[in-house]
Image (tube, rainbow, N blue to C red):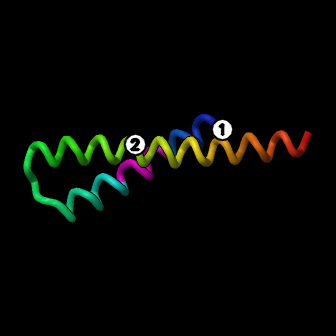
Amino acid sequence: MEIIKAFIVYLISYTFTYYSIKYSLSDHILISTMNIGISALVAASVTAFLSADLIKRKKNEI
């Protein structure tokens, strides 16, 4: 269940950052490729941060 929640957080943060960057920059192919990379990095880092926080909380409960 936690993996599904992390994946949903990843998708939401990916789409949010992708479209916010896309509408703030032009539609050039190089910039579109950069948008995808930046969005994936931001989404992965947000997911990793939330997963690490969840792991810390579970260790404190034990």
* Region rendered in magenta: 10-15
Residue topped by disc 1: 2
Locate residue 38 relative to residue 33 in the image: left or right: right
Instruction: Give the secondary structure at mark 2.
Output: helix
- Residue 14 position, x and y percent, is 39, 48
Tell me residue 44's x, y (percent).
Answer: 47, 41
**Mark 1 neighbour density, 10 Å: few (under 14) some (14–19) many (20 or more):** few
Left or right for 6, reference 20: right
Where residue 21 sits, quadrant-wise, is: bottom left
Q: Is residue 42 magenta?
A: no
Give the amino acid type for the residue marked by disc 2 in the picture. Answer: Leu
Q: What mark, if any, has residue 54 been given in the picture? A: none
Residue beneath the point at 37% across and 41% down: 40
The disc labelled 1 sits on which kind of residue? Glu
- What residue sits right under mark 2 in the picture? 41
Secondary structure at badge 1 equals helix
The residue that appears at 32% across and 46% down in the rendered structure is: 38
Marks 2 and 1 sit apart, C-alpha to C-alpha, by 20 Å
x and y, in percent, of residue 9 in the image: 52, 48
